[in-house]
Amino acid sequence: MRVLVTGARGLLGAAIAQEFAGAHDVHALERSQLDVTDDPAVARVVGDLRPALIVNCAAFNDVDGAEDAAAQALRVNAFGVLALARAASAVGAALVHFSSDFVFDGETDRPYTEADRPNPLGAYGASKLLGDWFAAEAPRAYVLRVESLFGPAGPGGARRGSLGTIVDRIREGSEVPVFVDRVVSPSYTPDVARAARALVERDAPAGLYHCVNTGHASWAKIAERAAAMMAVPLRMRPLTLETAALRARRPRYSALSNGKLLATDVEMRGWEEALEEFLGHETRHARADRQAGRQPG
């Protein structure tokens, strides 16, 4: 199967490209090769390549920046998805698009399901919700909501998500600012990529899925667990959503239920098990850097 991956230089895009490359003909394009906000370019590239599957990992992910750059967030997260969906329709391709927990307001006390009503708090969440709707223009669309992504750095650089930054600070012995009142379901990018591939290859029903690792915790609890696994002290600076100086509002409780995904026989392991694997990868990566005389990135 020919697969087109957009946003392939990012954290999730790199994991998707790697996961599909073993069994499929993958064309992984970064932004400089395909800007999803350029409708004619999208139509041309998809028309020339004629993929059976498009996996969209391109996104405007600056939650605070979106408050001042709402138009750009909409161009990427909403209208870029629409361009891809229409191009997919023109060639009969399936579309996998990734959404966010920020489509919800966080005013709940149990994990959100796909049936829950979205109510975004800011420009970023609104742009992602529009992308959810626009993806349906594709003849077969999978919209996978993820949150708090973490995983091995891709070819684009050192970005490994907020959890990667927390791990770096713990290892360095630096103070770690974390929310004590924001609850999330972390999403390990290799697991997300495996789930996306499984849905497509098994011809699972198209539609909306919450694609996160099983379980949930506050950022403070996640940091504590990471430090315990690393067997190093944690210098935590507790934050609350009220006291943090953030441009955009965050949902307080945004844990997602992956029960619908499990009903299709795609099981996501617990976030703690995924975190343990991630920490092992980070340790091996740091050791290789030291042996090669490189500075950790």
Image: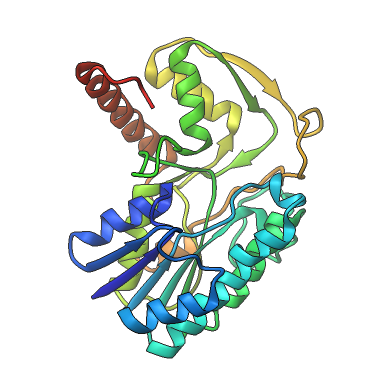
Q: Residue furthest right?
A: 242
Q: Position of residue 80 (x, y in %)?
A: 56, 70
User: Viewed as shown, does residue 203 lie left or right of 41?
Assistant: left
Q: Looking at the image, which residue is at 26% across and 22% down?
A: 289
Task: Tell me the colour scheme of the image.
Answer: rainbow
Residue 90 image-quadrant placement: bottom left
Which quadrant would the N terminus be assigned to in this image?
bottom left
Instruction: Name the one closer to the observer, 66 or 255.
Output: 66
Q: Looking at the image, which residue is at 55% across and 80% down?
A: 136
Residue 262 image-quadrant placement: bottom left
Give the answer, above or below, for where 45 lies relative to 172.
Answer: below
Which quadrant would the C terminus be assigned to in this image?
top left
Instruction: Name the one closer to the observer, 165 or 196.
Output: 165
User: Viewed as shown, does residue 57 lie left or right of 23?
Assistant: right
Q: Position of residue 200 (x, y in %)?
A: 33, 72
Q: Looking at the image, which residue is at 76% across and 34% down?
A: 241
Instruction: Name the one closer to the observer, 188 or 156.
Output: 156
Give the answer, above or below, for where 30 lies relative to 167.
Answer: below
Q: Position of residue 153 (x, y in %)?
A: 37, 39
Q: Looking at the image, which residue is at 39% across and 76% down?
A: 45
Q: Is residue 267 visible?
A: no
Residue 202 image-quadrant placement: bottom left
User: Viewed as shown, does residue 172 lie left or right of 38?
Assistant: left
Give the answer, above or below, for where 296 lies relative to 164.
Answer: above
Give the answer, above or below, for where 3 lies relative to 270.
Answer: below
Q: Position of residue 216 (x, y in %)?
A: 54, 41
